[in-house]
Amino acid sequence: MNDLIVKVISRLTIPFIQLYGIFIIMHGHLSPGGGFAGGAILGASIILLTLAFGLEGASKKMPHHVSKVIESSAILLLLALGMVGIVTGNNFLTNADAGFDLGQTGRILSAGFIPIATMAIGMKVASTLITLFHTIIEED
């Protein structure tokens, strides 16, 4: 697309969209939102970048191999968090019983490993959306 207005507006709004996505992920254990919603927002920002600047422009900011590494590492992080519960003799993805400090209620660094799991889910969702969209575009 060679529309100057779309490119300028996209360039101005994408950082704010990404900041909002990170905010939703980080506050997912305290308020509505979380990993899926924030990851979808982050993925949508890269999709907007792709629509405005084309696949080559978006690939400079988020190469396909980086997206695949993020996708794989996010699921491995989530599985590792789940395995901590099994290693400690508890259920998969257990939180307080596995020894995670729950912190103080209402703070960002509270809720044990839930914020970390939410970040992993957000990374997974965002990278999956980006990978799917770029794969669909590459097929055309």
Image: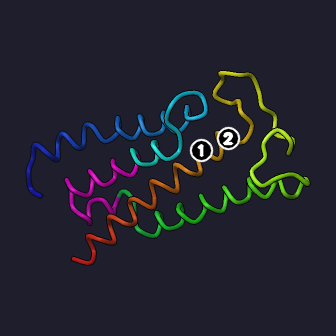
Could you tell me what secondary structure mostly forms the magenta stretch? helix
Packing grade of label 1 (10 A; few <14, some 14-19, many >=20) is many
Q: Quadrant of the C terminus?
A: bottom left
Residue under the point 35% across and 38% down: 17
Residue interval drawn in magenta? 42-60
Indicate the position of residue 121 as horizontal and vertical percent values.
Answer: 56, 51
Q: Are marks 1 and 2 in contact (CB under 8 Å)?
A: yes
Does residue 25 sit above or below 134 in this rendering?
above
Residue under the point 53% across and 62% down: 71
In 3D space, how far apart are the residues under numbered discs 1 and 2 (Cα atoms)? 6 Å
Secondary element at image label 1 = helix
Is residue 101 or residue 5 the one in the foreground? 101
Which residue in the protein does label 1 denote?
A: 118
- Does residue 50 belong to the magenta stretch? yes
Q: Amino acid at mark 1?
A: Thr
Q: Amino acid at mark 2?
A: Ile
